[in-house]
Image: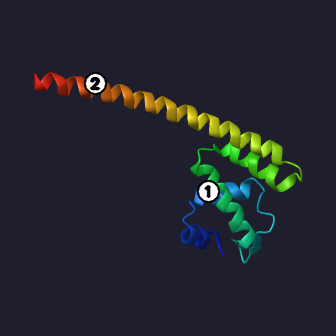
Amino acid sequence: MTIDEASERYHIPLEILHEYERWGLCGAVKKVMGSWQYDDTDLERLSMIMTLRDIGFENTEIETYMKLLLEQECSESQRLKMLELKRRSLLDEIHFHEKQLSNLDYLRHNIRKNQET
């Protein structure tokens, strides 16, 4: 499957596929007649990259995570630490937004209360 076919079929932006190639993570990708050919292993890796992007990982974090995943046999603890840090950060963000919503609801309540009187 070419880069354009992979992008279209799996809805992966071309910029992600180009980064994947630049990071050197596509060991199994072979160049055939001038274009990269992706196999199932590459598509699984790309799926992981998209998942990491979807949960808020920056490109440098994705590259680090993927290199740990592919290059180090005992990297589970390092990858778990990265995931736990991201989870903690997302929870902090959620709590911040919950507080914002609470304040917003308080202001709305006050306006409605004033309208009734």
Answer few, some or many: residues within 10 Å of disc 2's Cα (few below 14, many 20 plus, some between 14 and 19). few
Find residue 18 and name its label.
none
Q: Is residue 106 left or right of residue 52?
A: left
Figure quadrant of residue 6: bottom right
Q: Position of residue 57 (x, y in %)?
A: 63, 44
**77 shown above or below 42:** above
Q: Looking at the image, what colour scheme do you see?
A: rainbow
Q: Which-is-in-front pick, marks 2 and 1? A: 2
Q: Nearer the viewer, residue 66 or 33?
A: 66
Q: N-terminal of the two: label 2 or label 1?
A: 1
Answer few, some or many: residues within 10 Å of disc 1's Cα (few below 14, many 20 plus, some between 14 and 19). some
**110 shown above or below 6:** above
Q: Is residue 20 left or right of residue 56?
A: right
Q: Position of residue 108 (x, y in %)?
A: 25, 28
Figure quadrant of residue 5: bottom right
Q: Is residue 78 left or right of residue 94?
A: right
Q: Nearer the viewer, residue 109 or 10?
A: 109
Real-space Cα distance between discs 2 and 1? 39 Å
What is the quadrant of the C terminus in the image?
Answer: top left
Q: Position of residue 48 (x, y in %)?
A: 68, 58
Q: Residue at x 61, y 34 (%)?
A: 89
Q: Mark 1: which amino acid?
A: Met
Find residue 107 and name its label.
2
Q: Residue at x 20, y 25 (%)?
A: 111
Q: Residue at x 12, y 25 (%)?
A: 115
Q: Secondary structure at mark 1?
A: helix
Q: Position of residue 4 (x, y in %)?
A: 59, 70
| Residue carrying label 1 | 50
**68 shown above or below 27:** above
Residue furthest out toward the right: 73
Figure quadrant of residue 44: bottom right
Q: Mark 2: which amino acid?
A: Leu
